[in-house]
């Protein structure tokens, strides 16, 4: 899996299709639907890094810090990231993130899940455990480090979750 938790899930699904005998054309035809069903959620523990990287205006950090909230960024239809919700406070981030993610999951669906962490393995493991306890139908779940390129903007303590309904 790559540092991009969503891209890793897409590649794994394409590999699964190849393994069951689908040809290049069939996989290429299936990819747009696989991509549209895959979602990534990113919770930033400290907004300083994304502000320093020029990805977020400084005033947004001031407002978020004042109200003790953290935006949850997610993938949009055009492939960009944007806010899709907020989490109150930075303590117990795995618990709060798991609640947000579990609310996004359909109870009747099975999922492939990837969890990424920025230098916070214990939080990543806790988030993985909470999601596994909170949802019965998990086809596969992975835990990985988020690479340095993405971590530069996300900052230490950040958590990412890739969700993909399994077929």
Image (spheres, rainbow, N blue to C red):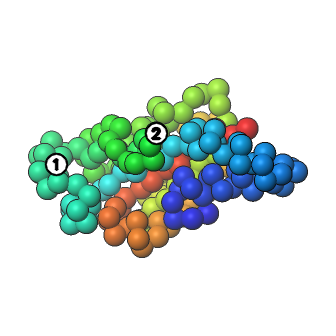
Residue under the image location 78 percent in, 45 percent down:
26
The residue labelled by disc 1 is 60
Where residue 137 sits: x, y (%)?
67, 36
Q: Is residue 25 left or right of residue 104?
A: right
Quarter of the image where one finds residue 151: bottom left
Quarter of the image where one finds residue 58: bottom left
Residue 31 visible somewhere in the drawing: yes
Where residue 154 sits: x, y (%)?
34, 61
Where residue 129 sits: x, y (%)?
55, 50
Number of residues whose C-alpha sits closer than 10 Å to that of mark 2, classed few (under 14), some (14–19) or many (20 or more): few
The residue labelled by disc 2 is 77
| Residue that protrudes farthest toward the front in the picture | 25
Residue under the image location 45 percent in, 53 percent down:
160
Residue 130 visible somewhere in the drawing: no
Alpha-carbon span between mark 2 and mark 1: 23 Å
| Quadrant location of the C terminus in the rendered image | top right
Q: Report helix, strand or loop for mark 1.
A: helix
Mark 2 vs mark 1: in front? 2
């Amino acid at each position: 899996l790559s540092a991009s938790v969503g891209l890793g899930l897409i590649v794994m699904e394409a590999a699964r299709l190849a393994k069951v005998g689908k040809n290049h054309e069939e996989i290429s035809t299936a990819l747009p639907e696989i991509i549209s069903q895959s979602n990534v959620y990113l919770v930033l523990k400290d907004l300083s890094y994304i502000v320093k990287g020029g990805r977020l205006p400084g005033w947004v950090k001031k407002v978020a810090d004042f109200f003790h909230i953290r935006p949850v960024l997610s993938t949009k239809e055009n492939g960009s990231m944007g806010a899709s919700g907020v989490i109150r406070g930075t303590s117990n981030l795995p618990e709060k993130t798991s609640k947000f993610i579990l609310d996004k999951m359909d109870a009747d669906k099975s999922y492939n899940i990837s969890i990424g962490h920025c230098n916070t393995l214990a939080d990543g493991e806790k988030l993985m455990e909470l999601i596994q306890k909170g949802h019965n139908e998990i086809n596969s779940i992975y835990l990985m480090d988020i690479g340095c390129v993405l971590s530069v903007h996300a900052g230490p303590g950040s958590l990412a979750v890739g969700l993909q309904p399994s077929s």
